Amino acid sequence: MTTKKPVAAHLAALSALTLAAVLGTIAPQAAQAQSTLKAADVHPPGYPTVVAVESLGKKFEGATKGKYKLQMYPSSVLGGEKEMIEQTQVGAIQILRTSLGPVGSVVPEVNVFNMPFVFRDEAHMRKIIDGPIGDEILQKITDSPSRLVALAWMDGGSRSLYTKKPVRSPADLKGQKVRMMGNPLFVDTMNAMGGNGISMSYTEVYSALQTGVVDGAENNPPSLFTSNHYTTGTKYYAQTNHLIIPELLVMSKVSWGKLTPEEQGLMKKFGREAQMEQRALWDKSVTEYTEKLKAAGVEFIAVDQKQFFEATAPVRAKYGAAFAELMKRIEAVK
Ligand code: GTR
């Protein structure tokens, strides 16, 4: 038997609901049901780092039953890496994928990985970031006053030089202005390699190349292609491989502190999974974009790396002094 409520009772219940919604007693609960995690990257949609972070977001959303949703801001829409690091520090961005390069200006301890030719090759770099030294550096970032929590590493391949005039030796770099990432270490590196290092945000490089403010830059094949820098006349790509800089995935400490211990554990776990997912995507993208660059007429020039290695010895001596022990440990990893 069903009991029929009088119409007035229904109306009273309804108006109580409306009142609750108006007063905001329901709305905040709805908002709380899904918090947005802002994630940012300088790279465009589809780039390995962007895809891996989006995938982390989906896993985190699933594991927290929809409590969080990741919103990706790709293609530098929130600024260059320096600005994005600052926004992450204050909690305006929750998750950031950045090169370790500009992080060195905020946490000098990471500069050991930012030195030219500190790794023998990419396989060596991977062994280091996957092992105890990689964990120690992540921990140093988290323990530093930077207000960043380091979650995981990602791959950024090797950086080589692209210029309008071919470069085969350090002597060919004389008088050439080459854009470097924001960190004095990189300007010193380019100066030691024979050119003039100019520190500049990634977002400004395309027009700087177009207008001749710089004569060249340096990066890995996926970035050279997706940034369109190769369309500005920089068709010579000298395979110096002078920097093998890992990429970093960080979370804002402000936002980290709002997660439960269980959610923090999930975030770490999915961060590490993103590291491996990105790596597989990375390897494919290097092959794919190398082919695309060659098809577009970019000439890959084989160079004697030893000359560039020797030219940059003073940079390793200057910046490496603080990391003497660590550098020995890095070298000892086979
Ligand atoms: C890319 C890297 C970016 C950014 C860029 C640059 O290889 O993935 O994080 O650092 O280089 O040159 O600024």
Image: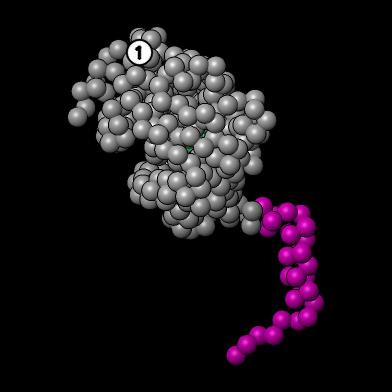
**Residue 298: in magenta span:** no
Check residue 8 for magenta coloring: yes
Give the structural element (helix, strand or loop) at label 1. Answer: helix
Question: Quadrant of residue 229 in the image?
Answer: top right
Residue 16 % position (x, y): 75, 65
- Quarter of the C terminus within the rendering: top left
Please tell me which residue lies in front, 291 or 323. Answer: 291
Q: In this orientation, which residue lies closer to the viewer: 314 or 18?
A: 314
Residue 264 in picture, x, y percent from top left: 43, 42
Q: Residue at x 77, y 64 (%)?
A: 18
Q: Is residue 184 above or below residue 42?
A: above
Rendered residue at 62%/35% (across/down): 206
Identify which amino acid the numbered label 1 is placed on.
Ala
- What residue did someone put label 1 on? 313
Quick one: 334 or 162, which is closer to the camera? 162
The magenta segment is 1-28
Q: Is residue 130 left or right of residue 211?
A: left
Q: In this view of the protein, can residue 87 be seen by the observer?
A: no
The residue that appears at 47% across and 50% down in the rendered structure is: 295
At horizontal 36% and vertical 28% (from top left) the residue drawn is 303
**From the image, which quarter does the N terminus lie in?**
bottom right
